Amino acid sequence: MRNQSEEQIRAGRGGGTALTQQRKVVLEVVQASAGHPTAAEVFEAARKLLPKISYATVYNSLRYLKEAGLVHEITFGNSASRYDRETERHDHAICKECGELVDFNLPETSSLMLSAAEHSRFKPESIHLTLVGLCPRCRTD
Ligand code: ZN
Ligand code: MN
């Protein structure tokens, strides 16, 4: 459990209102995941800690935690979102075969933001690189 998150919880929205038990369990599950679980995977793990928790509650809690900046959501077009305990900027590589999603950090990515903003005419807020390919277990070469 990282101190930064604890502080963010206390300083969180609603003037220091503590997280509900369900939200706390959902946050704990994401923070205990080394990988990048889907909502369904978070639900499976949360259920073991809080047997009566529903999928809808897990889903809504993830949305709340994301808005509070305590977890990060990674979206991929049509496939299920993945949740990340690491909220600092970093890059990802995803395996198109097995879905394995790993972190890496390329310092150069940040410097691409201005040029990306120019090309898209967007006002930039963040940038994140996703490498798509085959993970070491799935690659055959
Ligand atoms: Zn793979
Ligand atoms: Mn990540």
Image: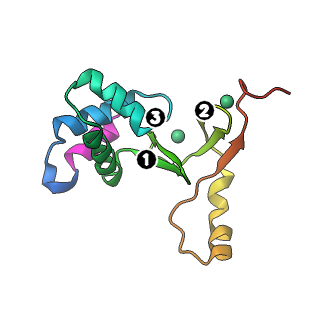
Q: Residue at x 25, y 41 (%)?
A: 57
1 relative to 123, above or below? above
Could you say which is closer to the camera, residue 110 or residue 55?
55
Q: Residue at x 28, y 44 (%)?
A: 61
Where residue 37 appears, as percent x and y from the top left, is: 46, 34
Residue 82: in magenta span: no
Q: Which residue is mark 1?
A: 72
Where residue 45 appears, as percent x and y from the top left, is: 35, 25
From the image, state whether disc 2 or disc 1 is nearer to you. 2
The reply, left or right, for residue 63 in relation to residue 35 is: left
How is the structure coloured here?
rainbow
| Figure quadrant of the C terminus | top right
- Between the C-alphas of marks 2 and 3, the distance is 10 Å
Q: Which residue is mark 3?
A: 37
From the image, state whether disc 1 or disc 3 is nearer to you. 3
The reply, left or right, for residue 6 in relation to residue 32 is: left
The answer to whether the beta carbon of the residue marked 1 is less than 8 Å from any atom of ligand 2 is yes
Could you say which is closer to the camera, residue 55 or residue 101?
55
The answer to whether the beta carbon of the residue marked 2 is less than 8 Å from any atom of ligand 1 is yes
- Between the C-alphas of marks 2 and 1, the distance is 17 Å
Q: Which residues are magenta?
A: 1-11
At label 2, the amino acid type is Glu
Q: Which residue is mark 2?
A: 100
